[in-house]
C-alpha cells in the first residue's frame, strides 16, 4: 500500500485527537476538510452499471445509497437492445427496473435467499440474434453440444456396453468350485499350455508312420473310450500323451497301436477311479501285444515324458469356457462333438488347447443360433475375440460338414446316439465356411 499522501481522505486511528502526522506535525482540523462524504464514495463504487450476470444480490444497493443518488442505479440483469438504448440516451436517464424486466418472464428469487435474483438465458432470446451478448451465444452453443454428446454416449452405452457376468456367483458356497482362486488356476493353465503343445510338423521326423495313421489310431481310441465308458478327461489326456511321445520318439507302424493302448492306460491311471486292467486293453487290441510289451512301453513313455502328465488339455478349458457361455446341454454336447472331430485332425495341432476350446464353443453357438455370437463374458474368460476365433471356427465348421462321410466316423457314430443328444445331426454353420472363400 502507498503512503497516506496518496490517500488524503484516509484517516489513521493513530492520527485522531491530536495524533502525530507522518511528517511529525500535529493533526489539525484542516485535514477534515479534505474528507469526502461516504455517499460520494459509494456513488463512485456503484455508479457504473454492473456487468449483466445470471445472479445478482439486491443488497448491494441500500436505501441510504439510493437516497444519495438523484438517479438511483438499478442493477441491469438483462442486456439492453440497441433500440432501447437509443431511447434511454434520448431521455438522458438510466433504465428503471420496470423497463428492464420483461413482463412475460418475471424475475425469480429463491426461497432460501430472497435477495438473490435468477435470470434465465432464455430471456436474452427476446431480442434479435445479433443483440444477444456473444458470451451467451457461445455458452448456449457449448451446452447444446454437450447435451448432444451425452445423448450419443448414452445410446452407445445401451447398444455396446454389454455387461460381463459373474459366472461364479452361483458357486460361492460350493467349496469344490474354489471360486476364490479359480481365476488364478486358469491363468496358470494359460501360461503352461504351451508345454502341452507339440510342433505341428513333428510327423516329418517319423520314418514309418504318417498323419493319416495317427488319425486312424485316435478314431479307434475314441470308440474304445466310448465302450469302456471312461471320463472325458481321459480321452484328451490320451491324445496329448500320444502326440508328445511321437514328437520325440520314432515308432514303427507295428508299434503305433501299442503306443495308443499304453497312452490310454496311463491316462486311466491318472484320471479314472476304476482303471481298466492290462488284459482288457490287450483284448480290445485283438491280442496283438503281450502284457510284457504293454508294461515295457508304459515304462518307456513315462520316462520319455519325464512323468509329466499334469498339463492342460482342451478339456480343462472347455469346462470353464462353457460356463462362461451359460451353456445348456445342447450347446455342451455340440461343442464336445466339434472338438473331438479336431482331435483326429493332425493339422489342428497348430492351435493351442485354449483356442481350440473357445473356437469349438463359438462354432457350436453359431451352429445353433445361425449367426455369429460371442458375448463379452466369453471374451473376458477366454481372452479371445471373435476375430481371433474365426479362422479356427471356419475349419471346424468344415469338419462338421464332412463328418460321417469319410472312413473315420468314430466321433460321428458316438454323437449320433441319444446319450449324446444326437449332436452329430445338427446342421453345420455353413455361413462360416462360405466366409472362408
Image (cartoon, rainbow, N blue to C red):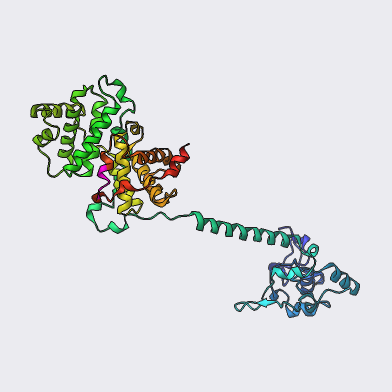
- 273 and 418: which is toward the camera: 418
| In the displayed structure image, the side of residue 21 where residue 302 appears, left or right | left
**From the viewer's perspective, is residue 354 above or below residue 253?**
below
- 356 and 30: which is toward the camera: 356
- For the magenta stretch, what is the residue range? 413-417
Name the quadrant containing residue 39.
Answer: bottom right
- The residue lying at 34 percent from left, 36 percent from top is 352
- The residue lying at 21 percent from left, 29 percent from top is 305
Residue 81: in sight, yes or no?
yes
- 39 and 54: which is toward the camera: 54
| In the displayed structure image, the side of residue 261 where residue 193 appears, left or right | right
Percent across and percent down for residue 364 are 36, 47
Percent across and percent down for residue 413 are 26, 43
Quick one: which residue is furthest to the front in this view?
Answer: 405
- Asked if residue 105 is among those painted magenta in the image, a careful observer would answer no
**From the viewer's perspective, is residue 200 above or below residue 356?**
above
Quick one: which residue is furthest to the top in this view?
Answer: 207
| In the displayed structure image, the side of residue 415 where residue 56 appears, left or right | right
- 405 and 167: which is toward the camera: 405
Q: How many marks?
A: 0
Name the quadrant containing residue 357.
Answer: top left
Name the quadrant containing residue 234.
Answer: top left
Task: Provide the major secondary structure of the magenta segment.
Answer: loop
**From the viewer's perspective, is residue 399 above or below residue 417?**
above
Residue 192: in sight, yes or no?
no
Please identify the quadrant where the N terminus is shown. bottom right
Percent across and percent down for residue 419 are 23, 50
Percent across and percent down for residue 149 are 60, 57
Amino acid at each position: 500500500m502507498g503512503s497516506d499522501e496518496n490517500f488524503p481522505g484516509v484517516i489513521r486511528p493513530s492520527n485522531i485527537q491530536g495524533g502525530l502526522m507522518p511528517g511529525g506535525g500535529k493533526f489539525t482540523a484542516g485535514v477534515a476538510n479534505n474528507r469526502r462524504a461516504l455517499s460520494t464514495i459509494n456513488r463512485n463504487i456503484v455508479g457504473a452499471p454492473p456487468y449483466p450476470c445470471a445472479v445478482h444480490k439486491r443488497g448491494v444497493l441500500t436505501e441510504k445509497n439510493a437516497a444519495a443518488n438523484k438517479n438511483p442505479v438499478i442493477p441491469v440483469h438483462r442486456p439492453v437492445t440497441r433500440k432501447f438504448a437509443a431511447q434511454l440516451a434520448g431521455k438522458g436517464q438510466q433504465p428503471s427496473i420496470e423497463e428492464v424486466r420483461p413482463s412475460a418472464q418475471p424475475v425469480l428469487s429463491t426461497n432460501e435467499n430472497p435477495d438473490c435474483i435468477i435470470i434465465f438465458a432464455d430471456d436474452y432470446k427476446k431480442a434479435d440474434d445479433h443483440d444477444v451478448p456473444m458470451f451467451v451465444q457461445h455458452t448456449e452453443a457449448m451446452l447444446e453440444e454437450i447435451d448432444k454428446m451425452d445423448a450419443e454416449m448414452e445410446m452407445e452405452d445401451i447398444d455396446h456396453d454389454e455387461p460381463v457376468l459373474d459366472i461364479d456367483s452361483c458357486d460361492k458356497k460350493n467349496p469344490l468350485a474354489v471360486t476364490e482362486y479359480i481365476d488364478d488356476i486358469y491363468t496358470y493353465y494359460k501360461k503352461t499350455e504351451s508345454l502341452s503343445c507339440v510342433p505341428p510338423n513333428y510327423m516329418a521326423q517319423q520314418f514309418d508312420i504318417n498323419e493319416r495313421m495317427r488319425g486312424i489310431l485316435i478314431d479307434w481310441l475314441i470308440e474304445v473310450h466310448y465302450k469302456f465308458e471312461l471320463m472325458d478327461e481321459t480321452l484328451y489326456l490320451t491324445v496329448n500323451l500320444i502326440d508328445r511321445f511321437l514328437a520325440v520318439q520314432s515308432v514303427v507302424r507295428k508299434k503305433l497301436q501299442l503306443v495308443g493302448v499304453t497312452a490310454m492306460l496311463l491316462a486311466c491311471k491318472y484320471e479314472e477311479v476304476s482303471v481298466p486292467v492290462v488284459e482288457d486293453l490287450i483284448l480290445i487290441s485283438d491280442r496283438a501285444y503281450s502284457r510284457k510289451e504293454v508294461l515295457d512301453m508304459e515304462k518307456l513313455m513315462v520316462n520319455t515324458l519325464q512323468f509329466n502328465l499334469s498339463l492342460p488339455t482342451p478339456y480343462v478349458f472347455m469346462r470353464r469356457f462353457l460356463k462362461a457361455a451359460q451353456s445348456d446341454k445342447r450347446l455342451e454336447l455340440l461343442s464336445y462333438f466339434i472338438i473331438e472331430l479336431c482331435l483326429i485332425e493332425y493339422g489342428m495341432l497348430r492351435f493351442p488347447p485354449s483356442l481350440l476350446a473357445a473356437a469349438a464353443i463359438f462354432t457350436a453357438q453359431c451352429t445353433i443360433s445361425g449367426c455369429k455370437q460371442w458375448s463379452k463374458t466369453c471374451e473376458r474368460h477366454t481372452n479371445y475375440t471373435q476375430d481371433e476365433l474365426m479362422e479356427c471356427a471356419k475349419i471346424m465348421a468344415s469338419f462338421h460338414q464332412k463328418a460321417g462321410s469319410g472312413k473315420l466316423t468314430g466321433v460321428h457314430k458316438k454323437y449320433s446316439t441319444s446319450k449324446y443328444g444326437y449332436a452329430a445331426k445338427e446342421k453345420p454353420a455353413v455361413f462360416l465356411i462360405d466366409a472362408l472363400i
